[in-house]
Amino acid sequence: MTSIGNFIGGEWRPAQSGATLENRNPADTSELIGTFADSSAADAELAIAAARRAFDQWRLFPAPKRAELLFKAAQIIASRKEDLARDMTREMGKVLDETRGDVQEAIDMTYFLAAEGRRLHGQTAPSELRDKFAMSLRQPIGVCSMITPWNFPMAIPSWKIIPALVCGNTVVLKPSELTPLSAVHFVKVLDEAGIPPGVVNLVTGGPAVGEVLTTHPDVSVVSFTGSTAVGKLVNQNAAPHFKKVHLEMGGKNAIMIMDDANLELALEGCLWGGFGTTGQRCTAASRVIVHERVHDRFVEAFVARASALRVGNGLEPSTQMGPSISERQLQKVISYVEIGRQEGATIACGGRRLTGGAFDAGFFHEPTVFTGVTPSMRIAREEIFGPVVSVLKCGSVDEAVGIANDVAYGLSCSIYTQDINRAFKAMRDVYTGIFYVNAPTIGAEVHLPFGGTRATGNGHREAGLAALDVFSEWKSIYVDFSGKLQRAQID
Ligand code: NAD
């Protein structure tokens, strides 16, 4: 059992108040993973001050040298992948294959964006005037605060920290209070790789820390991933200081299955998309919209396979689906099952908390499929973030696209079809940030932009080269070597 403090200015120290929070295994709450600093506003302020001081030097540290340190960090993470994944399963609950994937995503992101240290390209352009040179370049912005959720405990911090660092910014990270350990591991690796003191700071705790990170005048960028409700608050809190705010929020993603689809493939996709990570992915396929001609056949097979999923502790090799992250999250799932029942949808399988034996020590729920769902039901519109999939019927690709678009969110969507015309139509007409053909709604790769529209995001993108746009600002520079006044648009 470990007791871990905040990392501020290159030193580990407890919360100034001495308060701590417990991190327990959601598959077995008798296992205490560790105690962490339950920080207050004062700790967050110290971290911001350290990041502010470090910025003056880090921004001048040559970008290719920043990259060398980040490559080293990627190598260290890769060398510890298995241990990091095991710790993540213990604190977060998802199965080992998935936590290995989470760590791999951090490795991939670090290698991919570290390489930008030797690019960070700007543009040169001809001037409209003689003997004048024009160019643009990316500038670091300053202190970036990062507020992250619990479902990707290492991947999401890496998506934010690595592009921020390569651009020359300094960082204060506040991970979810439910999964601080993986964030601590990540920050320790960065320190070991030689990132100078104060460049990366970590403050664990809850909303009190988050609020300072979104309002403090010395914070220039706020990068938030979490629920739409908290994202809205973050946006409002950051607005008076004109901070750059990057929001990645909730989703209500749909898989559309056409009558010509390879149904076995679609079935595999729906099981993975709907119940992978216990449905606790922002990109989870919580809606399946099936063509009426194949609906009954699909539902029969889907229900059989969903009810056969092996639920349990993610460290057991046979487990296919782990627990919900917390009692609170599990209660949310239970309440939505009740809402669906009252709305008149049919519980085709699942629908109950799992109890008895080892289940009593954790937050387990049966994989649940609702049929007879209509687009206006709350279970078809609101993010549940658990192992609950709503099946809706459609009569055409146009109707499916209409249903897919008819929610507040716009993160990910997919279509199963053999018909290229339908695939391209859906690709064009579904208003999401991510779209898949003949694959589920999950499976993003780090070198493409990641994010969503409407209540999912505010126009920025994580990952890909788009991440650089969040963490840098363009400066246009004109050099006049004519020795005389030249007036643009006039001379
Ligand atoms: P959450 O909104 O409850 O918490 C997210 C983070 O915000 C946590 O670190 C939390 O401590 C912090 N926070 C809470 N109140 C705050 C406040 N007032 N000010 C500042 N920070 C505050 O979300 P969660 O339960 O941790 O995560 C699940 C949500 O995250 C889901 O809605 C999911 O869709 C979303 N998510 C989105 C993406 C994406 O890329 N779009 C990825 C993963 C998760």
Image (cartoon, rainbow, N blue to C red):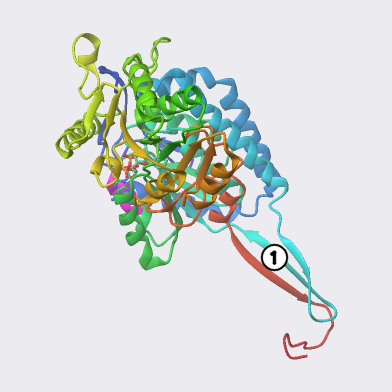
Query: How many badges with numbers are in the image?
Result: 1
Where in the figure is residue 27, as x and y percent of width and height?
A: 30, 19
> Foreground: 486 or 436?
436
Ligand 1 appears in which quadrant?
Answer: top left
Highlighted range, magenta: 206-212
Query: Which residue in the structure is indicated by mark 1?
Result: 136
Image quarter in which the N terminus is found: top left
Residue 107 seen from this side: yes
- 8 shown above or below 316: below
Task: Residue 210: say if magenta.
Answer: yes
Side of 363 where 247 appears, left or right:
right
> Foreground: 135 or 302?
302
Side of 176 where 256 appears, left or right:
right
Give the residue at x 68% y 41%.
Answer: 115
**Extreme-front residue of the structure:** 293
Q: Secondary structure at mark 1?
A: strand
Amino acid type of the residue tagged 1 in the rendering: Ser
- 240 shown above or below 471: below
Give the residue at x 17% y 33%.
Answer: 341
Where in the figure is residue 202, as x and y percent of width and height?
A: 42, 40
Q: Residues within 10 Å of mark 1 (few under 14, many from 20)?
A: some
**Extreme-left residue of the structure:** 342
Task: Residue 65: say if magenta.
Answer: no
Q: Main secondary structure of the magenta part?
A: helix
Quarter location, residue 360:
top left
> Foreground: 165 or 188?
165
Where in the figure is residue 231, as x and y percent of width and height?
A: 35, 52
Ligand 1 within 8 Å of the CB at mark 1: no
